[in-house]
Every structure is written in structure tokens, then in C-alpha cells.
Amino acid sequence: MATQETLEITQSNLNRIQQFDVKTLSRETELGLQMSFKDAVAPASELINIYKRIPLTVLEDFTDTQLNSINQQALADFNTFSSIIDFDATEDNAANRRNNIITGLRNRRDELFNTLWQYIAYCVARNTDTSILEIEARATIQSIKDQSEQLTAQLNTAKTDADSALAAIRAVAAEQGVSQQASYFKQEAEAQEVLADKWLRHTYWFALAVGSFAIFSLFLHKIDFIKPESNAEIIQLMSSKFLIFAVLGYLLLMAARNYTTHKHNAIVNKHRQNALLTYQALVTASINEGTEDIVLAHAASCIFSPQETGFSNSKGGDLPSGSKSVLELMTKRVTTAAATATTH
């Protein structure tokens, strides 16, 4: 086995020549076409290709003697490349030196291959060894399995987080939807409240008009041009008073009823708004299965069932439709539970 120092030096020098860029050897720009080393690029590439057939990972199998042999060849060829990089065309006998370097590179390929072919053959045999390939394949498969399990765990965690986030989003969206529907009843309640205040003022004015006319009528008979002189005029005056009182009383009654109606509608819509806003809390707080159906039916009854107005009266003996729905759901729930118990 090779020592660590020899192995590291050989790996460094071999890697350096394997990574060498042969395009830098041409130097046409600095030396011109005649003195350039354009003809040295091809043979230099062949040398580097031979070195590339020796993987750096295989060097640890060689001995110090074998590593020194590979290292010396790499150093010699790299020295040749360096001489081309440092070549000065102004020196004496530069043309002959250039030709000798190019000729040496052309003849170097066979000499290098004769020296390294045994190492290259070993590298090829090692890289194609089925047992080694099997071990590496198993290691690769195990690595893939480990990574896939890790990714699967991460995906499951991400899926759990995504489901939690989706549930939270759905809950918020449901609450926002309920709040949005409740705002319609809030707007209607506010509008009805404004109309109720308006008709309340009208009621006050009509009540004031009735009272004022009642006081004024006490002194009508004392006014000279209205004072009745005969029984017919007395009857006419009384009829006029009665008619005026009837009209003012009717207007007062209608104003009061309109006020009552709008005030009632404002309260009903406010109640519907509260029913929508508290429905989700009641369902969440319910423990037994099916309770949410009862709560939903009662809330729907509160919202959609017809409400009495200021112009009509409901019969106190009738059972509201909402109560009927609740009783039906409770009966259905009890019947279903009894049937389930009987089956089991």
C-alpha cells in the first residue's frame, strides 16, 4: 500500500495535468502564426487523454513505486507544457527549440502509453469488476432508499401541515361567510330603525294635531261666523268635528302602526343577525352527534320563518314552524338511535 504523502502528491499532479487546458498552448496572439505552437495542441490532447484514463480514486490501490512512476510522467509532461507557456521567441535559436518541443510531443504519446498501459489496464479491469460494481450499486440503491424515505417523511409532514392549514382556512372562510350573511340583516335592521324613528316623529305630530284640534274644538261654538244658529247648523258642526277627529285619529293610528311595524322588523332582523353570528359557536360547543342539525334547524327557523307584523296578529295557540322542525329532528334522532341499538 502507498503512503499517504505519496498518494496525495501523485493525485495532485495527475489531477493538474488532467485538468490542463490545451488551448493555452497555441499562443498565436503572442508569438504569431509562424512561431506559434498550434501544431502542439493535438499531440498534447492525446497525452492528456491517456492520463484521464487513470481515475484518481484508483491510485490508492497502487504502491509507492507505481505512484512515483505515474507522478514522474505527469511532472515531465507538465514541464513540457510549462516550457511552451514560457517560450520566448526573442531568445537565440528559438525556432529550433520550438521545433524540438513539437517533435518531442508528437513522439511522446507512444512512449507514455508504453509506460502507463499496465496501470490503465488495471483501472479498466477495476472499474468493470462486477463485484465492485455490485457493491457500488447496492450502496447507491441504499442511498436512494434512505433519501426516498427521508423525502417521504418530509412530504407526510408537509401534507399534515397543509391539511391543518387548509382546515384552518376553511374554518375562517366559514366564519367569514356567516359574518357576511349576517351583515345583510344588520343593514336591514339599521334601515328599519331609521324608518321607525321617522314614523315615531309622525305619530307625535298626529297626536299633537288630535290634541290641538280637541282643545280648539271646545271654543269653535264661540266664534261668531262659526257659531251655530239653528239645529241644522249644530248637527253640521258636530258632523264636521267627528269627521276631522276620525281622519286625524286614523292618521294617528296608521302612523303608530307603521312605527310598530318598522320597529318590529328592526328587532327581528337584529335577532336574525345574532342567530347567524352565534350559530357556529353553538355547533362547536355541542357535544352529541346530531345536535348541530337541531341547532341549524332552529337558527334557520328563526331566520326564514314568517314573522308577524304590526298589521297582523298571530294566533297564540299555533305552534311555530321552527318548534315543529326541532321536535321532528329530535324525534327522528331518537328513532334512529333506537333502531341502531336494536340492530346491534
Image: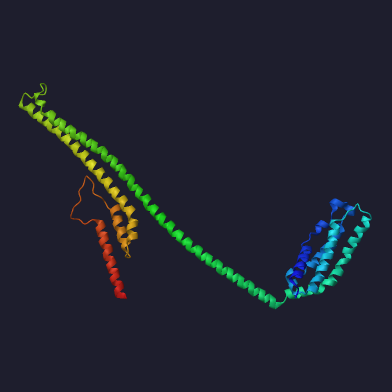
Q: Is 264 located above or below residue 157 in the figure?
A: above
Residue in front for this viewpoint, 119 or 78: 78
39 on left or right of 240? right
Residue, far bottom: 131
Please identify the quadrant where the C terminus is shown: bottom left
Residue 17: name its quadrant. Answer: bottom right
Residue 3: name its quadrant. Answer: bottom right
Determine the residue positioned at 84% across, 60% down: 81
Determine the residue positioned at 33% across, 52% down: 277
Q: Is 240 located above or below residue 225 in the figure?
A: below
Residue 14 horizontal/vertical position (percent): 78, 66
40 on left or right of 238? right
Q: How many marks?
A: 0
Determine the residue positioned at 31% across, 62% down: 291
Q: Please indicate, yes or no, whether residue 191 appears anywhere in the rendered image.
A: yes
Colour convention of the picture: rainbow
Q: Is 223 located above or below residue 183 in the figure?
A: above
Residue in front for this viewpoint, 8 or 22: 8
Residue 79 horizontal/vertical position (percent): 84, 62
Residue, far left: 231
Residue 284 horizontal/vertical position (percent): 35, 60
Q: Please indicate, yes or no, whether residue 55 appears anywhere in the rendered image.
A: no
Please identify the quadrant where the N terminus is shown: bottom right
Residue 205 horizontal/vertical position (percent): 21, 33
Residue 339: name its quadrant. Answer: bottom left
